[in-house]
Image (cartoon, coloured by chain):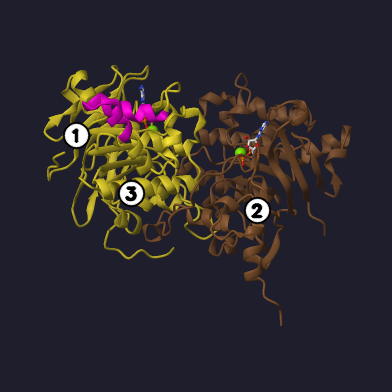
Amino acid sequence: MSALLEVQGLVKRFPAGGPVWRRRYVHAVSDVDLSIGRGQTLGLVGESGSGKTTVGRCILGLYRPDEGLVRFDGRDVAGLRGSTLAEFRRRVQPVFQDPYGSLDPRWTVGRSVQESLEAHRIGSVQDRRDRVRELFATVGLDPALGDRHPRNLSGGQRQRVGIAAALASEPELIIADEPVSALDVSVQAQIINLLQRLGRDLGLAVLFISHDLGVVEHVSSEVAVMYLGRVVETGPTAAILRAPEHPYTRALVEAIPHPDPSRRFRHASLAGEIPSPVDPPSGCAFHPRCPIAQASCRIQVPELEPVGEDHLAACPVVARVTTRPTT
Amino acid sequence: MTRTTGPALALDDLRVSFPSAQGPVSAVDGVSLELRPDEILGLVGESGCGKSTLANAAMGLLPESAEVSGAVRLGDRDLTILAERDLRRIRGDEIAMVFQDPSTSLDPVWTVGDQVAETIRAHRDVSRREAKARALKLMREVGIPSAEQRYGEPPHRMSGGMKQRIVIAAALANDPAVLIADEPTTALDVTIQAQILQLLDGLRQRRGTAVLLITHDLGVVAQVCDRVAVMYAGQLVEVATTEQIFSHPAHPYTEALLRAVPGTGEPGAELTVIPGQVPDLAAPPVGCRFAPRCPFATEECSIRPPLEGDEAHGAVACWHPRSRDREVTAR
Ligand SMILES: Nc1ncnc2c1ncn2[C@@H]1O[C@H](COP(=O)(O)OP(=O)(O)O)[C@@H](O)[C@H]1O
Ligand SMILES: Nc1ncnc2c1ncn2[C@@H]1O[C@H](COP(=O)(O)OP(=O)(O)O)[C@@H](O)[C@H]1O
Ligand code: SF4
Ligand SMILES: [Mg+2]
Ligand SMILES: [Mg+2]
């Protein structure tokens, strides 16, 4: 069975100044492959600037990829026009970090949700009213709050409205970009529970983008870890958090501040900072900070290779150690 | 610098309110807390609970409009009644502060090195050369690579993590007894956050600076704090050692907050939510401010519970505390 969403060899660059004949580029996303099955959740993690948002925006069709393709339900998204494009937009919906930006401040939030129904030509005018109330109930909001403006809602309530607006078109895939990052823990817990419940009840597939590994551990059993525009490791979240293979993932996992004083940082943390994506390091982009780098790491861009069951890492040094010949 | 055996900083029944159209906003309501020399004390709570107001009150940085009562004792002085001139002498010398966004603390047109050196010269009668030498030493101490080279750079050439190191260097320039860090790693990535937390911990150990580490992140607290004070809606609800807070939280709010953190329980399981919302501080509930959301609330709770306890068990402000002695059983 083919996946609902398939991303292959995705590349996205942004011009970063310089004369036309020697234009420099931000290498935001380089050769990324992802796949999400129907009803599945995939976590996409990485530190800021690693390219997570760009991947999400390429999938949504908000950015045109420079290379590679995004296939939704078997069809290349770049080739969609007219009604097939409208259909795609209905089936794939975004949820952002702060819906403040996506909700019109002059409209009541009820109207905003109603507008998304209209935009997708769903139901008659009369139906839409009822549908808005239903959607509010689905996301756990008192429908009476529909008469308020975004500024008169709390952060958690606004995020529920954002989710209601996304659900209006009955999508099959949600691209959730840091949906709980701006919220306090107790509110974050409510929204995470809501997203989990909706995923289950509505059979939604979710690309859950987050910089917080604790949140991703909770919401998705599969994860892809990005560093400087590339996926460096992917596989079952539990396995990756228990035994990360890629040296960058190891450093990332070791830096998680566990709310448990018996699990304090044990090692000196990863030295240095993420280099500029304008001239990313050659070969393995992690090599300047990597504790186990070898000479070849500066030359060869590592491929994702199996290091365990359904578990891939883009580091030939660890792959050599982990993969033993089967007897 | 002489260090006394008493607390490095003591808040005594501190109250701060701000005027608003809905009436006074009671942002800090009767907080008493001691920061001991050499310790990292975490102050944790969700946004709007009054953490920054408390920190600004301790630094004498509140706006004119704020109504303040109670005392902030640094040594034998009460900072709430000092004149601005005297405060300015103390700030950056005996007590210093680090904010969430390092850019707000740094002047964009000055070199970062000169800003550290200037902090020294503002309080010490030393030559420019001497100040520069000390600034360089500080920059190395806070882990800035090729400090000589970076000394002459403006802030915008530096990453957020590097800028925060510069701010920490400037804060430590005059070897203050107390450092207040208000969400110092909130804007940083996790690997950089780990570096900065390890830096703060190392500085505390080497220099014996008392640190009040303010954060909304229970993970940050667990990593580096010796003791933890939990704040809810302007009041302290619990103060105990980090081990106690995380293994046997005594206040229902602390317990609920810990359970709401993802990544601690079973993946995919429903997270515990705290019903209701944070109260409006212009019209807070009488008595225990957590009562309307508390599963254990009784009639008694309409009277404010005092923050009580002892050294061994920590202190809790609750009429029905969860027992510290109870075994934590997995539910
Ligand atoms: N529209 C844009 N124009 C130029 N550069 C961009 C744009 N969007 C993102 N970038 C750059 O691409 C890189 C990846 O950014 P982003 O996808 O936002 O990462 P993340 O979401 O992981 O923080 C960053 O260096 C960022 O500055
Ligand atoms: N300068 C101010 N004027 C009016 N209200 C303020 C001011 N500063 C803070 N407050 C209010 O005081 C309360 C506590 O805020 P704050 O101390 O910033 O909380 P925290 O740092 O825990 O997020 C909030 O209700 C906030 O709106
Ligand atoms: S005092 Fe009462 S309302 Fe407040 S936390 Fe304790 S039990 Fe709950
Ligand atoms: Mg992003
Ligand atoms: Mg604050």
Q: Give the range drawn in magenta.
A: B112-133
**Are labels 3 and 2 on one chain?**
no
Determine the secondary structure under disc 1. strand
Specify the label residue A294 is tagged with: none
> Mark 3 highlights which residue?
B201
| Chain under disc 1 | B
Pick the residue in front: B137 or B222.
Answer: B137
Pick the residue in front: A132 or A180.
Answer: A180
**Are labels 3 and 1 on one chain?**
yes
Report the residue that reaches farthest toward the front: B129
Pick the residue in front: A320 or B23.
Answer: A320
Q: Does the residue labelled 1 lie within 8 Å of ligand 2?
A: no
Q: Which chain is yellow?
A: B
Q: Residue, x 66% and y 69% (percent of image)? A: A320
Indicate left or right for A163 with A172 as reference: left
Which is nearer the N-term, disc 3 or disc 1? 1
> Mark 2 highlights which residue?
A298
**Circle 3 or circle 1, nearest the eye:** 3
Determine the secondary structure under disc 2. helix
Specify the label residue B13 is tagged with: 1
Q: What residue type is labelled 3?
A: Asp
**Residue A39, image x and y in percent?**
71, 53
Q: Which chain is brown?
A: A
